[in-house]
Amino acid sequence: MPRPVATRITIALGDLLAACTAENGYPSDVGQSVFLGQIQGRADDAPAIWLIPGSQKRRPVYDNVREVVREYSVRAFSDLRSVAGWADATAAERRLIEVELVDQVIADVRRCLDTWEAASAELPSLISHLGETADKPGYSEEGGTRVGAGVDFTVTYWVDPADPTTPA
């Protein structure tokens, strides 16, 4: 049975985010593991990304074709212990390392998402627009070493509700 367009988009976005690794030029390396539709993970999963599909809004475009705007949330986390110099850093230096790593996670996820048209063979055939809406830093709790960020964005695509497996 063919997969719905919405599912194919989520899978393709997950594949895109899996490229967010150090070997591909993304220093935070958060693409090492990508979890689809999973809201919570374990701290030991870091570095990792959780891609969570959200609500969808539909509006008629023509005939039976609908424009769909779907919200997505990326939650990406890295481990401060993976940063060179972390073990020997002072408390003030560790705070700066933490702020920098959080900003790096945000920058890496944004930059990776920006490549959707060139980096993915399937996404350009499925979606018409990928738009970011917001990001939010996530700092460690007392004594914790996992930090990250949330990046929320929308995807716009067209589909015939009578055939949700084929892009319109």
Image: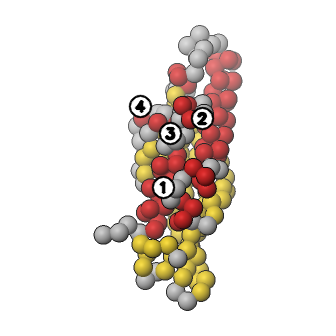
Q: Earlier in the sequence, mark 4 or mark 2?
A: 2
Out of 153 and 117, give the one closest to the viewer: 117
Out of 68 and 137, give the one closest to the viewer: 68
- Residue corresponding to mark 2: 26
- Residue corresponding to mark 4: 44
Question: Would you say 152 lies left or right of 5 here?
Answer: right
Alpha-carbon distance for marks 4 and 2? 20 Å
| Residue type at numbered disc 1 | Ala
Percent position of residue 15, x then y: 47, 49
Alpha-carbon distance for marks 1 and 2? 19 Å
Disc 1 crowd rating (10 Å Cα; few below 14, some 14-19, many 20+) is some
Q: Earlier in the sequence, mark 3 or mark 1?
A: 1
Question: Would you say 95 lies left or right of 4 here?
Answer: right
- For discs 3 and 1, the disc positioned in front in the rendered view: 1
Rendered image: mark on residue 31: 3
Quadrant assignment, res 45: top left
- For discs 4 and 1, the disc positioned in front in the rendered view: 1
Residue 103 position (above or below residue 119): above
| Residue type at numbered disc 3 | Gly
Percent position of residue 110, x then y: 64, 46
Which residue is at the far top?
88
**Residue found at x 60% / y 14%:** 85
| Residue type at numbered disc 2 | Tyr
Q: Are marks 1 and 2 in contact (CB under 8 Å)?
A: no
Disc 4 crowd rating (10 Å Cα; few below 14, some 14-19, many 20+) is few
Residue 80 position (above or below residue 66): above
